[in-house]
Image: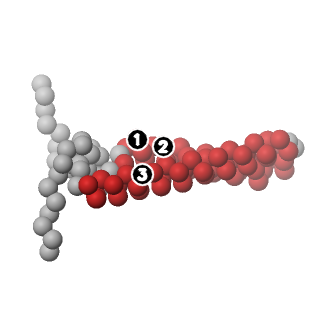
Amino acid sequence: MDREPPPGGPDAGGPQGGGPQGGGPEADGLYRAIMMVLVSSVMVGAVLTLTGEMLFGSRPLANVGLGMAVLAGIAYWGLRLKARAAVRRMARSGETKSGERGERPPPE
């Protein structure tokens, strides 16, 4: 019943997969999904800001769009900075994603 996932699948570590071997938060599917939602929120907010008053005749709708775009943009950059810091911290300490100490390759 327990089958091993194919090589190179979602559990394969490295830059493509977010498995136990590493890759950091940027390789994680959940991280990518959250980033896509934030980017789309920024775009929807920008569209509302630019067209809210012109198409719908509602200045409050344009203001809501601006606020949404700004808040989603701040969340996007905050999450991005946090993920980069986590990747640097993992690389510096030699840890894998599962928290185990990994062997560092010898310097060349």
Residue bearing mark 2:
34
Question: Residue 76: horizontal and vertical position, in percent?
Answer: 54, 50
The amino acid type of the residue labelled 3 equals: Ala
The residue depicted at 42 percent of the width and 45 percent of the height is 31
The residue depicted at 36 percent of the width and 48 percent of the height is 25
* Mark with earlier residue (1, 3): 1
The reply, left or right, for residue 102 in relation to residue 87 is left
- Secondary structure beneath dot 1 equals helix
The amino acid type of the residue labelled 1 equals: Leu
Q: Quadrant of the C terminus?
A: bottom left
Instruction: Work out whether residue 80 or residue 56 is closer to the camera in this orientation and state it.
Output: 80
The CA span between labels 1 and 2 is: 6 Å
The CA span between labels 2 and 3 is: 12 Å
Please say which color scheme the image uses: secondary structure
Question: Residue 6: horizontal and vertical position, in percent?
Answer: 17, 43
The residue depicted at 57 percent of the width and 47 percent of the height is 75
